[in-house]
Image: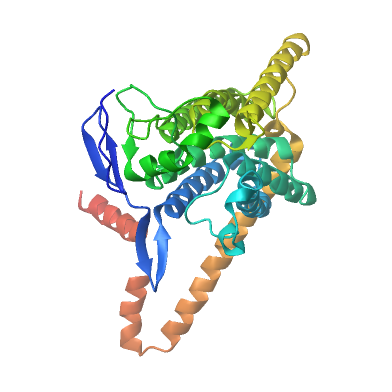
Amino acid sequence: MEYLDKLPWNQLTFPGFGIELNVNSDAFTIGGLTIKWYGIIIAVGLMLALIYCFGKMKDFGLDGDKVIDAVFAGIIGGIVCARIYYIIFNLDRYHDIKEIFNIRNGGLAIYGGLIGAIVFGCLVLKLRKVKILPVLDLAGMGFLIGQGIGRWGNFFNHEAFGTNTTLPWGMSSGRIQNYLIVHGAEITDKTGIVVDPYLPVHPCFLYESIWCLLGFLLLHLYYKKRRFDGEMILMYTCWYGFERMIVEGLRTDSLYIGDVRVSQLLAAVLFAASLITLIVMRIRIKKHGAPVLYVNTEESKAMLKAAEEREKEEEQRIKEKKNKKRSKEKAELAPEQRIIFDNDDITDDEKNNEEEKENGKAD
């Protein structure tokens, strides 16, 4: 490997590809408040996940109106627990109470976020009497979207990188070099590996992003063939757990209990547990047949029918409200202005129908 010179603070380079970028964590400033790329990207990932999941609610037999409260609870619980999880294993780094609440520079642990989202979301689902497993199935795909995109927040923060590598996509930056200089002895003490600050390192954020987006694609292609409620969330934990179990072993910023990487241990447990459960369920299905999916139950069908009727009633109310408003506006006009007003009320579809009738008469 060729040694790199001391790099500027925000210069991020992929020397194997000859790529050099100036990557600043700050996106822009409004009224003295600096908005971070990290937060923007996390928000984009969250929004795309929500758009996808709410678009697929009916495929899982769910009424989005009943699930939305659980979604908000999951988001809040996820953010809070992601921060708590991170701080618990980094208590020695926080000497100022204000820093504990400052998440703009990172410091959110994925596993803490997932645990918080699932626990708080499921509590609300229970209160709303909504079936939990179909929601978790859909959430698993949403998690993969959010994680796949959200990991690019680490790119802008120059974090979530690994040990030295000779692979062509190895990266480095001034901030990465500084981190390794400051924490090099700690990393060696924990892992037994000496990391050279002036050599490229593994872009672990990139590995996880690609793996999560690939996992989402595979689950998206499979979900209509699922055999039982809960299968998709098991596939998610198995898929993500396998990747995290391996990639976490490369990272230089892992959270530890003693000499054990917390996320790596948790990933291994989730991978093994979900894989065993999937195998057991497949054996049961082979012997006794597949259970009825919630989407195919009478309860789900009745709920979706009621939701469809509510949507129609809401559309009718909006239409009636609009007509009343137009009638009031028309009543306030002079007679000659009402003719123009009536013409404006004709929709594009009505105009097209009239034109087709006229064309038919001409033929």
Picture quarter containing residue 290? top right
Tally of numbered discs: 0
Q: In the rendered image of this protein, does residue 328 appear above or below residue 295?
A: below
Picture quarter containing residue 254? top right
Q: Is residue 157 visible?
A: yes
Q: In the rendered image of this protein, does residue 60 appear above or below residue 265?
A: below
x then y, percent, for residue 256: 62, 35
Residue 35 lies left or right of residue 122; in this view the side is left
- The residue drawn where x is 73% and y is 47% is 125
From the image, which quarter does the N terminus lie in? top left
Q: In the rendered image of this protein, does residue 81 appear above or below residue 18?
A: below
- The residue drawn where x is 51% and y is 30% is 188
- The residue drawn where x is 38% and y is 47% is 156
Residue 180 lies left or right of residue 125; in this view the side is left
Residue farthest to the top? 287
x then y, percent, for residue 43: 48, 52
Q: Is residue 304 visible?
A: no
x then y, percent, for residue 5: 25, 37
- The residue drawn where x is 44% and y is 50% is 44
x then y, percent, for residue 170: 33, 29
Q: How is the image coloured?
A: rainbow
Residue in the foreground of this view, choosing between 110 and 322: 110
Q: In the rendered image of this protein, does residue 70 appear above or below residue 2?
A: below
Residue in the foreground of this view, choosing between 263 and 312: 263
